Image (spheres, rainbow, N blue to C red):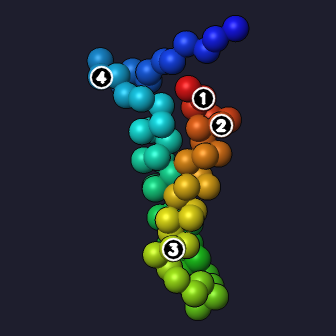
Amino acid sequence: MERVPREVEIRGIYFPPLLLCGILGLLLAWLTLIALYRLRWDHYIEAPTIAFLALSVIYAVILSTWVIPS
């Protein structure tokens, strides 16, 4: 049984699911780091840029696996 690729349609524009998962992953990672900065946990992060990138990838994979599967 083959899976047919599908797109997500928003107001007549078709987007690939991985693009939306990537954008949402970036947004969630940004919000997570803002929360960490407000809680003053930012001094536990050695490299904030790498932490942002890692969180973005983790969120994008979780979203593409369970929320918006392709």
Compare marks 3 and 4 and give the one earlier in the sequence. Answer: 4
Image mark for residue 50: 3
Q: Mark 1 touching mark 2, by CB under 8 A? A: yes
Q: Secondary structure at mark 2?
A: helix
In this view, the residue in front, 44 or 34, is: 44
Residue shown at the point (57%, 31%) measured from the top left: 68
Residue 4 position (above or below residue 37):
above
Amino acid at circle 2: Thr
In this view, the residue in front, 2 or 23, is: 2
Mark nearest the camera among 3 and 4 is 3
* Furthest residue in direction top, as rendered: 1
Residue carrying label 2: 65
Q: Position of residue 8 (x, y in %)?
A: 44, 23
Q: CA distance from mark 1 to mark 4?
A: 18 Å
Residue shown at the point (42%, 39%) measured from the top left: 19
In this view, the residue in front, 36 or 63, is: 63
Q: Mark 3 touching mark 4, by CB under 8 A? A: no
Q: CA distance from mark 2 to mark 4?
A: 23 Å
Image mark for residue 52: none
Amino acid at circle 1: Pro
Q: Position of residue 48 (x, y in %)?
A: 50, 79
Q: Residues within 10 Å of mark 2 (few under 14, many from 20)?
A: few
Q: CA distance from mark 3 to mark 1?
A: 26 Å
Q: Secondary structure at mark 3?
A: helix
Residue carrying label 1: 69
* Image quadrant where one finds the C terminus: top right
Residue shown at the point (44%, 38%) measured from the top left: 20
Q: CA distance from mark 2 to mark 3?
A: 22 Å
